[in-house]
Image (spheres, rainbow, N blue to C red):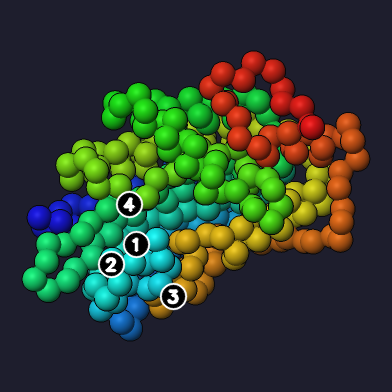
């Protein structure tokens, strides 16, 4: 059953890559995505699309990949050791956007589908994905809008879905060594096969298709906000946290590298400029200090006033 649906999932993901690139290039207004295709020696390949030095995006990428092989890498079997030794197909689209203006948040999303095979046994399949928002100079109305769209995407699938996957996102995108979230969260789900296939696939499409509704209004609202060297320096400092998460904690980065994926595409998620400064903290009461109050889990649908630093 699962293999018979692989082509339909792949077709959707390729069309999602197209729609994301078309809309984001139109938003940028100055650049289009450059495309290159690649092949993986062990099986599969992908289609990478990157935008750099645009009118709005300093760097961004929307990557499609379909890789397969004789054995799942360790990052995929660490939480599910019963899958060790199975062959696999993994197909997905991932995207990361790094705007130049520090008032526009960085954002990440992905949707993916896995099949794990073993002779004489039924295939094991599951979906995963989500999207999250990483502001530098946060705005409460942006965080609320982001989560309102996320909640609406989940609503047809049950009242418990948004709270569950919102909490999972808060937990997953938590930098344990910094004791802070990566941003204001969103949705995260993995190992999703508890519903019938068609319902799981419909949920993946709902998440993927809602990203533009969540992100475009925020970017349009903030794109003309003035900024200077101070804001750019803080943005590059906070981008260092983004790098730390992706290299230390992110399962997708580990899976891509361990499965022999294309390194340039996997590390496309990295910001173009980041910096680290020893023991630097923002001055209390400064615009930069406002962010710290946002970097803990909040019930964004019901927050009525600006979060305050502890």
Q: Nearer the viewer, mark 3 or mark 1?
A: 1
Of the numbered discs 3 and 4, the one sitting upstream in the chain is 4
Q: Nearer the viewer, mark 3 or mark 4?
A: 4
Task: Using the numbered discs, state the Cα–Cα distance from disc 2 to disc 3 in whole angstroms.
Answer: 16 Å
Instruction: Check the image and report above or below for 168 versus 66.
Output: above
Distance from disc 1 to disc 2, alpha carbons, whole Å, reads 6 Å
- In three-dimensional space, the C-alpha distance between marks 2 and 4, rounded to whole angstroms, equals 12 Å
- Callout 3: helix, strand or loop? helix
User: Which of the 4 image quadrants contains residue 199?
Assistant: top left
Distance CA(mark 3)–CA(mark 1)? 16 Å
Secondary structure found at label 4: strand
Numbered label attached to residue 83: 2
Q: Is residue 31 above or below residue 287?
A: below
Depth check, front residue: 310 or 251: 310
Question: In which quadrant will I find the C terminus?
Answer: top right
Among numbered discs 2 and 3, the one appearing first in the sequence: 2
Q: Is residue 48 left or right of residue 177?
A: left
Q: Residues within 10 Å of mark 4 (few under 14, many from 20)?
A: few
Q: Which residue is mark 3?
A: 258
Residue at the right extreme, as displayed = 283
Return the residue found at the far front: 82
Disc 1 and disc 2 in contact, CB within 8 angstroms: yes
State which tag comes first along the sequence, 4 or 1. 1
- The circle drawn on residue 191 is 4
């Amino acid at each position: 059953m699962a293999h018979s649906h692989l082509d339909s999932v792949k077709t959707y993901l390729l069309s999602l890559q197209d729609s994301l690139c078309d809309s984001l290039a139109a938003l940028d207004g100055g650049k289009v995505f450059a495309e290159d295709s690649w092949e993986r020696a062990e099986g599969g390949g992908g289609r990478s699309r990157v935008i750099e030095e645009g009118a709005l995006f300093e760097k961004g990428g929307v990557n499609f990949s379909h890789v397969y092989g004789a054995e799942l890498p360790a990052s995929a079997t660490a939480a599910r050791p019963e899958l060790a030794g199975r062959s696999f197909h993994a197909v997905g689209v991932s995207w990361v956007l790094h705007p130049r203006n520090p008032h526009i948040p960085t954002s990440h999303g992905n949707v993916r589908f896995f099949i794990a095979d073993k002779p004489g046994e039924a295939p094991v399949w599951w979906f995963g994905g989500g999207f999250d928002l990483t502001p530098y100079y946060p705005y409460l109305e942006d965080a609320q809008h982001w989560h309102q769209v996320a909640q609406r995407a989940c609503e047809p699938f049950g009242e418990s879905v948004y709270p569950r996957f919102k909490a999972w996102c808060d937990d997953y995108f938590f930098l344990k060594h910094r004791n802070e979230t990566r941003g204001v969260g969103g949705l995260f789900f993995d190992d999703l096969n508890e519903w019938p296939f068609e319902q799981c696939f419909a949920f993946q499409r709902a998440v993927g298709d809602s990203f533009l509704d969540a992100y475009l209004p925020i970017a349009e609202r903030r794109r003309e906000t003035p900024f200077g060297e101070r804001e750019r320096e803080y943005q590059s400092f906070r981008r260092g946290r983004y790098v730390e998460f992706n290299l230390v904690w992110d399962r997708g980065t580990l899976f891509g590298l361990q499965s022999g994926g294309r390194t340039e595409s996997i590390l496309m998620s990295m910001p173009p400029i980041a910096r680290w400064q020893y023991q630097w903290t923002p001055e209390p009461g400064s615009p930069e200090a406002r962010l710290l109050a946002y970097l803990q889990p909040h019930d964004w649908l019901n927050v009525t006033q600006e979060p305050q630093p502890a």
